[in-house]
Structures are given as structure tokens and as C-alpha cells.
Image (cartoon, rainbow, N blue to C red):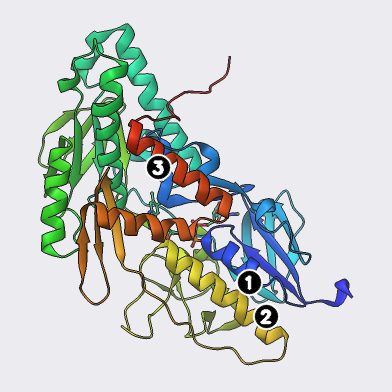
């Protein structure tokens, strides 16, 4: 009977939460999935939404749709406000508190501005779907404003500073440069294109520090080919709506600053009474359960999962989140069926990132590397596999192919209020 089934409460509808909920499909359990949004966000494609390559529905997918055929699952849209691990109860904003038998903690990470003055108010972070839409609308608004009054170009209206030489920063800078040179140059032929600068600022000595030197060199050249100005060894010290100040004292005229520089675990974890690991992440055992509370599983970006093979903490990646979520779903199903849990084994598909059309880098676990079109195909294959449904995959292929052949950006419209 449904009422006597154990309740599995899944917090967060990201890769981890959805992976867990879907693997519980055949469990004799009541599965409740709660997220503050009514959609799953495909973060790796946010920069494509921000630069008009994809539309919103290719990056956000209805959560109800994802568990629609799952008889034992329900979805609620609500913000989690507190978790009492001892009482096994979760509190929400606007939804009655809920108790659980098993808890899946998949609330992801949050942007970390590292206390940079003005960043919280004026920077454009790239972590959620509303962030990407806000950046796209802002860029379009600045170009339309310059079209009406070209004198603002000299004040940096079209300049964009991207902070962070990791995948989020590099992918965004490359995509913005292609949008500027390939699309806006045609859309706004009257404007002085050479005065629209894309500047990537990285605190370390090089971009893509996680990749081998030859991939870093390739990336630096690919960015330069796309007219991205790379400034390494520089730290942003303050941000205002029209200016970006660097620690070196230099002031950049730029009406847009994209923040791709840092993450921290969801703030909620601080109130759990657990000892946290670096970056506010919850430490888990080999089966991904929290040692002090074996009925609680922490997964994806919010967890510090140690890889059994390398003994290193796994990076905050979509494939780690999806695989850990699926493992937790399977382990809870096994435990409900009276079987033993098994340790998690991560299948590493390589570290990869795109820089622009036909330019990408891939580094495999064994040390093999790929660049260029081959790497971009590998990136596409790995990321298509992460998309939640076949319809999403088909749609992404059509949009990517369209953009490759026509260089068009179908999403470069602003839908504000009338
Ligand atoms: C711009 C960007 C690009 C990336 N590119 C890549 C890439 O190319 N390849 C790759 O493998 N990985 C990439 N990543 C990393 C990858 O997206 C993450 O590792 C992955 O999304 C983590 O999944 P998750 O389920 O742990 O968390 P998330 O996907 O963040 O999901 C957490 C969910 O919890 C919900 N939530 C949070 N707080 C609350 C609350 N209080 N109440 C209710 N709901 C809440 C959120 O709405 C969200 O749906 C990228 C990340 C970013 C930001």
C-alpha cells in the first residue's frame, strides 16, 4: 500500500537529483522530488543560451516531464529552507514540512564572488537559467542602445570582461567573441566593431590550468584567433555598472562583467551540523551515504566524493553528478529490497571544454589529448548523453548544426514586457 511505502525525498532536480529519482522507478517507495524551479537546468549549455545559440527550452526541461511515466514519483516546486537530520524532516518555503526515510541531497553549488566589491550587485554570474537569459538580454540591450547612440561605444558599452580562465569563463568568452564578430558585425554594420572588446581576466599564470600545457597553448591561440584579449595574473578588485577595476590598478571601461570564477557549496549545508570539506561540500562514504547519517545521500556538486581509483575528490562536473545520482537511486532501491549497498565507481569520460566553433580540447584519464573538430565531436557526444531526453538531444543537434552551417543565432531576441 502506498501509505506504508518508505519515502525517498530528493532535494534538487539537477543531474544528481534527477538521476537518483529516475533510478528509483521500480523501487517500492514513494519518491518526492523538490526543486525551487519547475525545470531541470542543463548548466553546460548556459553559455549557448546567453549567446543566442540555443533557446530556453533546450537548456531548461520540465521536471514533471522527466518523471511523468514514473508511477511512484511526485514533483513539488518549493525552496528548501532547512533540514533537520536528527528529526529526518525538511522545511520548505510555502510547502508543509516533510519527513523522510531516505534523503537525497542534490542541491548543487552557488556562485562565490569572494567578497569582490560590487560583484553581487553588478556582475553577471553564469550559474542558472535566469542568469543566462539576463546576460543575453543585457548584451542585446547594450547593442541596441549603441545603435541609437553610437557615442556610448567609447564608454565601453559593448566591452565585456569575463572573469575566470576555467571552462565557464573560456567557453563564455569564446562564444561571445563569435557572437560579436560573426553575428553582431552583420546586425549592426554602422557600429565600430573594433571597439567592442572581449577581455578574459584570469588570476593564475594561464587559462585552463587543469589541462596539459599543449592544450593550454592551443586554447590561448584559439581565443586570440577569436579576438579575445586574455589577461592572466590579474584579479578583479571591484565592479560598477560601467567600470571594472583590476588589483594592478588598471581600470577597464566595460558595461558588462561576466563572473565565471568560483563556486561554493549551497549555503544550506552549513546548518546541517556536519563537518564540511573544502568548498562547503559534504563528505560521503564509498557508497555516497553520509557516514553520520546512512539514510542520507549527498551527491553531485554539493558532495566531496573521493574517487576509489585515484583517491582524489572528484570535480564538480555533470557526469559526476549524474553518475552519483544514479548510483544513490540504485543503492536506495537495493536497501529497500533488503539488499546490500555497493561502492560507487566513477566512469571518467575525460575532461573537456569548447572554445568556439571547431575549437575544443579533451584530456582523457590515461593522458591522451584531442583538439579541434575531433575534440568538439567528443564534447558533443559526452554532453548529448547528459541531456535528459531524446527530444532534447535531437533539438540540440539541430540547433548546433544550424549554427555551424549558417552562423546564425536563433535565440538573439529579447522578450520583455510590452
Ligand atoms: C556555466 C557552467 C558550465 C558547465 N559546464 C560543464 C560542462 O561542460 N561539462 C560538465 O560535465 N559539467 C559542467 N558544469 C558543471 C555541471 O553543470 C554541474 O557539475 C552539475 O550541474 C551539478 O549537478 P547537481 O545536480 O549536483 O547540481 P545542480 O545542477 O546545480 O542542481 C541543483 C538543483 O537544486 C536546486 N536548488 C538549489 N537550492 C535549492 C533550494 N534551497 N531549494 C530548492 N531547490 C534548490 C536548483 O534549482 C537546481 O535545480 C558546468 C557548470 C556551469 C555553472
The front one of 154 and 211 is 211
Q: Are marks 1 and 2 in contact (CB under 8 Å)?
A: yes
Q: Are marks 1 and 3 in contact (CB under 8 Å)?
A: no
Q: Earlier in the sequence, mark 1 or mark 2?
A: 1
Q: Which mark is residue 166?
A: none
The front one of 166 and 392 is 392
The front one of 80 and 384 is 384
Give the CA distance from mark 3 to mark 2. Answer: 38 Å
State left or right for residue 114 relative to residue 389: left
Q: Label 2, on which residue?
A: 333
Q: Which mark is residue 400?
A: 3
Indicate the position of residue 21 as horizontal and vertical percent values. 64, 66
Residue 337 lies, with reference to residue 122, above or below; the image says below
Q: Label 1, on which residue?
A: 23
Residue 146 lies, with reference to residue 11, above or below; the image says above
Residue 76 lies, with reference to residue 288, above or below; the image says above
The front one of 306 and 123 is 306
- How packed mark 1 is, by other alpha carbons closer than 10 Å (few <14, some 14-19, many 20 or more), is some
Amino acid at each position: 500500500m502506498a501509505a506504508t511505502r518508505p519515502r525517498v525525498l530528493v532535494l534538487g532536480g539537477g543531474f544528481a537529483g534527477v538521476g537518483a529519482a529516475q533510478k528509483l522507478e521500480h523501487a517500492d517507495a514513494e519518491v518526492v522530488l523538490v526543486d525551487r524551479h519547475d525545470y531541470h537546468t542543463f548548466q553546460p549549455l548556459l553559455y549557448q543560451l546567453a549567446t543566442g545559440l540555443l533557446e530556453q527550452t533546450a537548456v531548461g526541461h520540465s521536471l514533471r516531464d522527466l518523471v511523468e511515466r514514473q508511477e511512484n514519483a511526485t514533483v513539488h516546486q518549493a525552496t528548501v529552507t532547512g533540514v533537520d537530520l536528527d528529526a529526518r524532516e525538511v522545511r520548505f518555503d510555502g510547502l508543509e514540512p516533510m519527513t523522510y526515510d531516505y534523503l537525497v541531497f542534490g542541491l548543487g553549488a552557488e556562485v562565490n564572488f569572494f567578497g569582490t566589491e560590487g560583484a553581487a550587485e553588478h556582475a553577471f554570474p553564469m550559474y542558472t537559467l535566469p542568469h543566462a537569459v539576463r546576460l543575453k538580454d543585457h548584451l542585446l540591450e547594450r547593442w541596441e542602445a549603441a545603435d541609437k547612440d553610437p557615442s556610448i561605444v567609447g564608454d565601453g558599452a559593448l566591452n565585456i570582461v569575463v572573469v575566470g580562465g576555467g571552462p565557464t569563463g573560456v567557453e563564455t568568452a569564446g562564444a561571445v567573441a563569435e557572437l560579436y564578430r560573426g553575428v553582431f558585425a552583420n546586425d549592426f554594420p554602422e557600429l565600430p566593431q573594433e571597439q567592442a572588446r572581449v577581455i578574459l581576466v584570469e588570476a593564475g599564470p594561464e587559462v585552463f590550468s587543469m589541462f596539459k600545457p599543449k592544450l593550454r597553448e592551443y586554447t590561448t591561440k584559439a581565443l586570440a584567433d577569436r579576438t579575445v584579449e586574455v589577461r592572466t595574473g590579474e584579479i578583479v578588485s571591484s565592479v560598477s555598472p560601467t567600470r571594472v577595476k583590476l588589483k594592478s590598478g588598471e581600470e577597464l571601461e566595460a558595461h558588462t562583467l561576466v563572473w565565471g570564477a568560483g563556486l561554493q557549496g549551497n549555503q544550506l549545508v552549513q546548518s546541517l551540523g556536519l563537518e564540511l570539506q573544502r568548498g562547503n561540500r559534504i563528505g560521503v562514504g564509498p557508497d555516497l551515504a553520509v557516514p553520520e547519517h546512512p539514510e542520507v545521500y549527498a551527491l553531485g556538486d554539493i558532495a566531496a566524493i573521493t574517487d576509489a581509483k585515484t583517491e582524489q575528490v572528484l570535480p564538480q562536473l555533470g557526469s559526476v553528478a549524474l553518475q552519483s545520482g544514479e548510483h544513490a537511486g540504485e543503492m536506495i532501491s537495493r536497501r529497500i529490497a533488503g539488499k546490500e549497498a555497493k561502492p560507487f565507481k566513477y566512469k571518467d569520460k575525460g575532461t573537456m571544454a569548447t572554445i568556439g566553433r571547431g575549437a575544443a580540447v579533451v584530456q582523457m584519464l590515461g593522458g591522451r589529448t584531442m583538439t579541434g573538430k575531433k575534440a568538439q565531436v567528443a564534447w558533443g557526444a559526452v554532453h548529448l548523453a547528459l541531456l535528459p531526453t531524446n527530444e532534447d538531444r535531437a533539438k540540440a543537434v539541430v540547433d548546433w548544426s544550424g549554427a555551424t552551417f549558417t552562423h546564425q543565432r536563433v535565440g538573439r531576441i529579447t522578450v520583455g514586457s510590452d
